[in-house]
Image: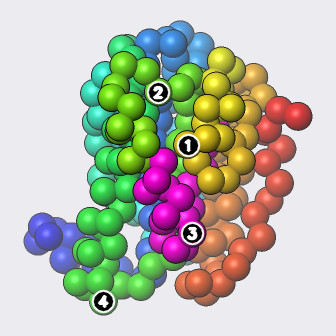
């Protein structure tokens, strides 16, 4: 635990609502998809920071996956979050990306416990336009097993969004919740929904069941 994090927890002892944005930056996202995703990330920050309580309670981490898994942003409260500018290249190491996201959450929970910070069930919000590609099958199997175990034990809420071209059938095998197919490149509406959902959760009691708004950005 870094000193600045200890200070940050002391200055802001609010319960935390951690959310990992797990983003596909493989070559097929080149052009309009990655541009729309970057614009959506800016919208997410702008919308969420308007809510004073959410901006202190919601923590965002950003992980990209292509041939490499990169922690673009480790957990940080929304009021300090700067939306990244992503670029696209390479294949789709999805299984490794999922495992990294779950590892990051486990480490953050340890930080919270160490400092007496209560927390809501963490979210992972994965956005992809494809399916696992170029990595060992075992990485995907391990990732899928971990999602299902942690979902069943209420340790994480894992959401998968399929952009045009995504293999929804394959995603359904990997995750527990039904994947949602994005309507066109409507990342802006999707991130506004995610912001509204995070606000609802952050205004609730820890462990309270929260009704989420319907995903109007999903393709029927």
Dot 3: element: helix
Residue at x-position 55% and y-position 65%: 151
| Residues under numbered marks 1 and 2 in contact, where contact means CB atoms less than 8 Å apart | yes
- Residue 145 magenta-drawn? yes
How far apart are the two marked residues, 1 and 2, measured between alpha carbons? Answer: 10 Å
Which residue is under mark 1?
174
The mark lying in front, picked from 4 and 1, is 1
How far apart are the two marked residues, 4 and 2, measured between alpha carbons? Answer: 38 Å
Work out whether mark 3 precedes mark 2 in sequence or the reverse, and give the earlier one.
2
- The location of residue 58, given as percent across then percent down, is 49, 66
Tag shown at residue 116: 4
Magenta part of the chain:
144-161
- The location of residue 48, given as percent across then percent down, is 58, 57
Which residue is under mark 3?
152
Residue at x-position 43% and y-position 21%: 133
- Residue 200 magenta-drawn? no
Work out whether mark 3 precedes mark 1 in sequence or the reverse, and give the earlier one.
3
Tag shown at residue 132: 2
- The location of residue 176, given as percent across then percent down, is 62, 53
- The location of residue 113, given as percent across then percent down, is 29, 83
| Residues under numbered marks 4 and 1 in contact, where contact means CB atoms less than 8 Å apart | no
């Amino acid at each position: 635990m870094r000193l600045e994090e200890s200070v940050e927890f002391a200055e802001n002892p609010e319960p935390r609502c951690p959310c990992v944005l797990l983003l596909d930056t493989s070559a097929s996202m080149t052009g309009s998809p990655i541009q729309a995703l970057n614009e959506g990330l800016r919208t997410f920050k702008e919308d969420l920071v308007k809510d004073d309580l959410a901006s202190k309670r919601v923590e965002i981490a950003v992980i990209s996956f292509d041939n490499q898994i990169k922690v673009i942003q480790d957990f940080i409260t929304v009021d300090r979050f700067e939306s990244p500018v992503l670029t696209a290249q390479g294949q789709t190491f999805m299984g490794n990306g999922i495992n990294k996201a779950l590892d990051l959450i486990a480490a953050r929970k340890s930080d919270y416990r160490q400092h007496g910070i209560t927390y809501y069930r963490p979210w992972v919000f994965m956005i992809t336009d494809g399916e696992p590609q170029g990595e060992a099958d075992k990485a995907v199997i391990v990732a899928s097993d971990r999602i299902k175990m942690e979902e069943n034990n209420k340790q994480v809420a894992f959401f998968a969004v399929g952009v045009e071209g995504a293999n929804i059938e394959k995603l359904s095998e990997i995750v527990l919740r039904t994947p949602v197919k994005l309507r066109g490149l409507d990342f802006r509406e999707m991130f506004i929904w995610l912001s509204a959902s995070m606000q609802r959760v952050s205004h609730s009691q820890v462990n309270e069941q929260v009704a989420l708004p319907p995903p109007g950005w999903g393709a029927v």
